[in-house]
Each structure stands twice: as structure tokens, then as C-alpha cells.
Amino acid sequence: MPGRWFTAASERRNKAHYAGGVFLRRLMSTATRNGPRASGLCRSMGFMSIERSPALFSPLLLTAARGFGHLVREVDSHGFKGDIHALRHKNSASTQRYVAEALASEENIIFCGAYHTGKMTILKAIGEVCEKKGKKVVYVSADSKRACRIDGMLLHHFLGLRYFGKNELPSQDQLEGALGRHARLCESTYASCVPSLATADVFIFDAVDQVAPTILTSIDRVCRDLRGRLREPFGGLRVFAAADFWHLPVHPSSDTGGYVYQLDNWDELFPRQRLLEKIHGQARRLTSLVNKAYFGLLTPGDIEELEARSATRGLTVEKEDESRGVEDADGSDGDDDEEDGASNESSCGSGRRHSKHESNNNNDKRKEGGSLFAGHVASLPPQKLISNVEAIVKFTSRFPKQPAIRVLPPRFRTLKRTEIGNYIVSMLLQSSLLSSFSLVDSLNLDVGSSVHLLLGAPASFGVPPGTVGEVLQVKEHVLVVHFPSVHRTVEVPRMRVSVYHSFYPEVRYEIQQFPLFPRQSISPLNILNYQHAYNVEIDCHRLADTNDLGNILARMRSFDDFSIQRTQDFVRLDGMIHEPTRIYYQRISNRPLSSAAEQWCRNCKSYVPTNEFYSHWNECIRQVRWCSECNTRIPLERLEPHQEKHQIVLCLDCGRAVEWRRWEGHRLTCSAMMREVSPENEFLPLRTRQLALELGLDKRDLHTMRTFSRSLLPKSRKHCSGGSV
């Protein structure tokens, strides 16, 4: 009987969702066809003032509030109740100050800052205020994780584009044509099932740092054309954006130009640009060192302090850090967290108090050091970082022991036969990937494996995210894990997340996976891609990309969460600070570059007076580039053909790597010829030799090569020693 009752209840729930979806689809279709006759009904449902109540944020009422359909992501209560949104401080005082400041002006604004500075929380709070005023708000992000947390859709789904790689973008005209066709399709065929650039009133745009400049330019031009306001940015569409330009995929040899914030009309698109520097839930002194690491201002004294305080696990924390840490965890003014670091600590405060009463050693260390998190990790050794290559090998096992479970809906083929079916199914499929919910696709956990919790859970679970534990028992759908820092042994079930469209609730894509991360796979890349990787030993020789030091330290709550070594070796390397982003952030925050009379321009390799540097930089990156092979300036319009001359090719006959500009000379003088066409060459078939002789071919015509990466060449002693011989 219990099984039958559960089945019947599930069927009734699905029928209710289906009925609601049919009702909304018919309502929106009627509004589209009849126009003024249905405006009263749509106004009563779609533009009424909504109070903050848990019952009002169901998929049906959210659809009515926004005026169009949207994606719904639900966590099944029968599995792990992970918090996939984690935006709990939208009503805090500091967040509301930013909201009031943004809405008081009619100009577009973009919030910039590092991880955990509250950008997403501010955007979500702005969107909810606009929804209460009856405006149609669309939430869009270029990152799948952030699109899930902000309860929005991916950018390429919103624009009607397939996902493009870095080198696959079409031309500007093709992009504008595709965006315009999709916007007209949303108004006609899709009938308010999805939002578009023409129907939205407010555009909440997250993760602008991952958007190509050509796409942002196309959005601006198409909006001006669709809305008929050619002189206004985005055609009068109100845009609130956020970006973390420290997280750009850059490396030491990256170009100094071509970034989205270097567009000619960037200041016109976003007249107001705000830099957020406060990292919430983090000790104040650590935040100061993180900002210095981002801007390349770490002194030898700062590096010594960073390594010493992290090595002692925070036992010498100052009193101001103690008061700051407690303030952030208690939910005061600093609680407009972008992530859920401090809030999760406060939500699991009962577990901490239990641990405090049972462990006198941890209590003494908290009193001595004043660190909020010392009791959690004092008895656990830090996990050493591995390289990104090793982590990729461990993550790509052919036969994982705990693979993710994907449940496809039985009716998705029926939906694909409709006019909007292919579009909806593709959007659901790409929005239901494991990475969108910060879960690991494949796990290989055995008894004794060390893991940490990836997502926050209700306070009754008693284990905050990031807590390190040991697997005691492995079952098919449950893992028994002991967390010694909170003195709890719990059963961790699989987390079940369903993704569906509010108009088609009968078509659901479901994924299931354990919310755990294997500690032996912690690398710099995994720290940036997955949340709450604490209690780690950071070896700066393992850091690979630009801004890695600042990005990793920004994810730590206090000095107790990490230990770091060989920082000086990383800091002194050239290109470890992204110069274009540093200059842009200092410009929008109205800070001088330095107190020196002259500044070094990395683009043209010359000294420029400090008071003229910003204007020089803007002109310089639009006109020239520096060629490190020729040690000369190259005009920007001639850069691409010039770089082709320095391309490395590999001679398949002698095995030598040759620059393309020297290939003709090598082709005529290569001595290790294995394919010479002559009657004496027994390696070629007789008929081939006869045809080659008849056609007049010789060894120079058969000489072959292939493209070769310069990074595979042997490095000189100068490069291996970091620039000093």
C-alpha cells in the first residue's frame, strides 16, 4: 500500500504540473493572438505586485510574474537536499544599498569584482524589485553554474545560438542575422514560451567576462534595430550586468587586447561601472592580501606574512580579524555574499557548537587564535595540490565506480515534433549537465577515500559544505561518511535534480549524483571549478595560469583553510598578473597606477608618463602589438599575416622544427630525405616511381611537414629558470 500511495501521489503531482503548463500555454497564446482583449487577464496575472512568500515562488506564479516561460530546477526531497541557489542575503543592508543605487539612475550598470564579492546577489535582488514593479525581467548568464544559481538561462539559448568555441564564432553580420531571426521567432512561433531581446524590459546579464566582444556588439545592434531606438545603448533595454574579469581564461603569453571591456563603445554601453572589492565571509587581513595578489602589489613582507600565518593555521590572527570573521558569520552587514561561505557556517552553527563542547583542544585553539574555522580542520592534515594534468587523468576514468545517473523523459520525442520542440529539448539537455550544479560527473570512491561536501544542506544535516570526511561504507545510492571535525557519521544519498520548462512540466530531465568531491583530485583548476575546497596545501609551483594565486586565495575563508609555500617563485614570474584587467580596474576605481613618474606599457614596450598612461593605453591597444620574436612593434592590421611567418612546422623527413618563413630554404636543403624519387629508392612502389618520373616530380615536391606547437619545443635555460640565467 505505501508503494501504491506514493505512485498515485506522484501521478497526481505530474498531472497538476501538466495542467498548469497547459493553462499557461493557452493563456499566453490567447494574449498573443487577441492582444487588447486578453490584456486585462494577462495584467492581472503577469504584472501584479508580488510579496515575498514561499508559496508565491512556485513555477506557475514565477512564470506569471515574468510574463514568459522559464527553466525550473528542482531538488528532490527524497535525495540529498542540496542548495543549488545559495543566495540568502538579498535583503541585507549592503545589498539593498547597491540595489537602490542601481535603480536610482536610468543608465546601465555593470558590477565587477572577484569571487565572493556579492555580484550575483545584487543582480538577483535588482531583478526581484523590477518584477514587483510589473516589468518583464530576463535572467541570463554565460556560465552554466551561475545560470543555475540565478535561476536563469544560458546566453546562447537566450540568443538562439549553438554553443561556439573560442575560434568558431561567425562573422558580425551572421551573428546579427541569427539574433534578429530568433527574436522574431520568439514573438511569432514560440508565443511567449521564451523571452527575447524585443519582449524583455529588464536584462539581468551575468558572467559578461565569458562573452566574446563580437557577441556583445551584436546584441547591442540588434536591440537598437528591434526596438527602434538607434541612438540609445541596447535600444533602451535596461541592462544590469556583472563580471569577474580576474577569471578570464588568460595565460602569460595572452594578447594585451581584444577583451570585451576594451570595446570602443564600452563606456556608452555601461556608463556606470562599479568595482566590488570586499570578499564576504573572509578574514579582513586575508582579503587585503588577496587584493594585493590580484594587482601585483605583494611585497616580500606580505609574502612572508601569508606563508607564516597559513603555516601556523591561523594561530596568530589579530583581534580585528576575529571580530570581522564573527561579524561575517553572524549575518550582519557583510552578508550579501555571492557564495554561501559565511551563511552556511551560520546555518550549521549547531554542529559547530556541538564540536566546541566535545573538543577542548579545538576550543583552546579558537580562543588563542581567534579564528572562526580553526576547530574544523586543526586535526586534519592539509591536502596537497596535484597538477591540472593529473587531475584530468583521474577525472576521465573509463569505468567509474559511481557514475552519474541521467534519467531521460519518456515524452521528449513527442515534444520534439512540435514547432518549439527541438529548441526546448536542446535547452533542457544542455542545462541539466552535472557541471551546472557543481557536481562531479564520475566518482571512484572506495572505503577509506577522503572526500569533502560540495553543497550546503539544511541545518538538520549538521555538516557544513567543505567539511572533510572519510568514506566508511559504499552502497549503490548511499555513502556512509564520517566527518571527524563535526563528530558526525551520516548517510549521504545521491542528489536528484530535475530540469524542465514551466510550460512543459511533463518533460523532465533528471540527474543523480553524490554531492562529494574526492580530495586526491584537488588541483588549481578544480579549486576554481568546484566550491568549498578547503584545508589544502598550496604549492605555487603547481599554479599554471595568470591570476591563479589571487583566484585561489579568494576562495579561502581564513588562514586556517590553507597553507602556502614558494609564493615568491610564482610572484616573480612575468605575466602572472593580467595587465589589461589590472589597468581597467584601477581606471574605474579612480586609482593612480603608482607614485612613479613613468609607467611601463607592456603592449608597445615603452615608458609613458603616468598622467598620460590611460589615454596612451586606450590608443595603443587599438593600433599596435609587440612581436616577441622580432622584438618590434607591428601594426594591428598586419598582425595576423605577420604571426603566420612565425608559425612552427615539423619536417617529417628530418624531424626538425622550422619556422614557416624559413621553410622554403629548408625544403631545398634537407639532407635526410626518405622519399626521394629515383629508380634506386626501394621504399617506393615501382609504379609510383615510374609515374613520378613521367610527371617530373623530385624530392622537393614530396617533402612534407605538419603544424607544430611552439610549446612542445625544448625550453632554454633562461625560460626554465624564470628569466634569470
Image (cartoon, rainbow, N blue to C red):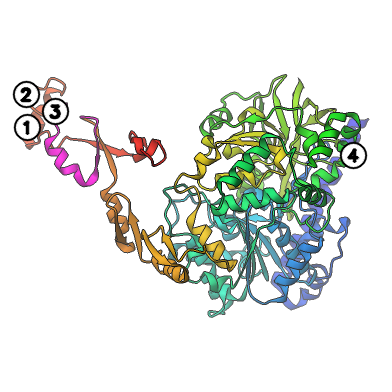
- Identify residue for label 2: 679
Q: Considering only order in the chain, which callout, 1 or 3, is on the residue closer to the N terminus?
A: 3
- Identify residue for label 4: 350
Crowd class of label 4 (few under 14; some 14 to 19; many from 20; radius 10 Å)? some
Q: Residue at x 81, y 63 (%)?
A: 93
Q: Nearer the viewer, mark 3 or mark 4?
A: 4
Instruction: Tell me where residue 173 appears, x and y as whole percent.
Output: 43, 66
Q: Considering only order in the chain, which callout, 4 or 3, is on the residue closer to the N terminus?
A: 4
Q: Nearer the viewer, mark 4 or mark 2?
A: 4
Q: Residue at x 31, y 58 (%)?
A: 639
Circles 1 and 2: CB distance less than 8 Å? yes
Q: In the displayed structure, would residue 204 be above or below residue 86?
A: below
Instruction: Tell me where residue 59 appears, x and y as whole percent.
Output: 79, 55
Which dot marks residue 693? 1
Q: Which residues are magenta?
A: 654-676
Q: Amino acid at mark 3?
A: Thr
Which dot marks residue 688? 3
Residue 416 visible in the picture: no
Residue 211 picture quarter: bottom right
Instruction: Tell me where residue 156 appears, x and y as whole percent.
Output: 57, 56
Crowd class of label 2 (few under 14; some 14 to 19; many from 20; radius 10 Å)? few
Q: Amino acid at mark 2?
A: Pro
Q: Considering only order in the chain, which callout, 1 or 4, is on the residue closer to the N terminus?
A: 4
C-alpha distance separating marks 3 and 4: 82 Å
